[in-house]
Image (cartoon, rainbow, N blue to C red):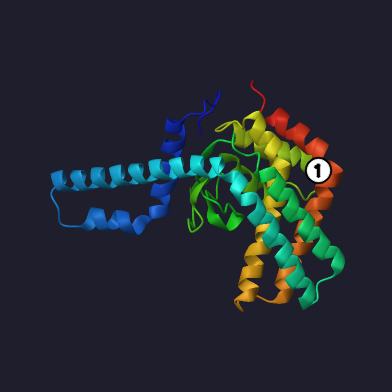
Amino acid sequence: MSSGRYESSDSNHIGRAITFLLIGIGAGALAALVLAPKTGKQFRRDLKRGYEDAKDTLQDWTEEAKDRARDAKERVRDVAERGANLADELREAGMGAEQAGLLTAAADRAGRWWSGTGGLPGQVIHGDLTPANFLADPGTGEVIGLLDFELAGAGFRVQDTMAALYYSTALTTPDWPRRTAAFLRGCSSVNRLEPAEVAALPELLIARSLGSVLWRAARWRAGLARFGDVIARVEKLEASTRWLAANEGTFLFVATAANAAP
């Protein structure tokens, strides 16, 4: 892992994105190249062409991320309306009025925050950094690879940091400040978050919880999940909201210190 001061640039973003994409392509595609009966010259030419195609695609995705940031205000109404409509639907299906109100409030909060995200750095992100999607060295614990690029695409750089933190146990233990600080220091050794990204972490925690509810609700509507599964996600959103109400100040202090310049 590299260390030192992080300099935000399109070339840095694209370089890391290419690494992630090549991991996501998988061993099958690489094996097809290696095992195909070609001369060394043909192999190198095909490999170079594949790399250039991937680079062009990722440059397009980076531009898409910037466009998404510029168009953020247009999403505000959609986020709030989806949350409100879902709350009404779930209440009719049996969810309590208090939880329905919580869901509506979270959607409103996410919508209001989203309108001010135009300055956040954008790049290609993984989008689903759950523990199950990491490969780690059993001897050292070092992360050596990523799986499941189904949700990969253009987004805000800080989203992956928040997703990994959200799905870890760092925020759910009594000594969460120490664990969270250690986690964020590790992240900042590679990519130090900008002040605006640190400030966005609490809002992204709510947005991540809300997105989990919306995703599970979509599966419920399609008959692929139980109503109780949706309620469980709403309860996680409720827990995240209450946790932030009690700890947001300390959380921001820890995150700021972990990303401070040496």
Closer to us: 241 or 140 = 241
- Residue at image x 28%, y 47%? 50
Q: Relative to 172, does residue 215 appear above or below in the rendering?
A: below
Q: Position of residue 132 (x, y in %)?
A: 58, 58
Closer to us: 259 or 9 = 9
Residue 156 shows in the view: no
Query: Disc 1 on helix, strand or loop?
Result: loop
Residue 104 shows in the view: yes
119 to the left or right of 107: left
Closer to us: 51 or 28 = 51
158 to the left or right of 53: right
- Residue at image x 79%, y 62%? 235
User: Please, what is the three-letter code of the amino acid marked with disc 1?
Assistant: Asp
- Residue at image x 50%, y 30%? 2
- Residue at image x 68%, y 46%? 204
137 to the left or right of 58: right
Q: How many marks?
A: 1
Q: Quadrant of residue 227?
A: bottom right
185 to the left or right of 58: right
Graded by Cα atoms within 10 Å as few (under 14), some (14 to 19) or many (20 or more), the crowding at tag 1 reads few
Q: Position of residue 220 (x, y in %)?
A: 65, 74
The residue to which callout 1 is attached is 175
Q: Relative to 74, does residue 16 appear above or below in the rendering?
A: above
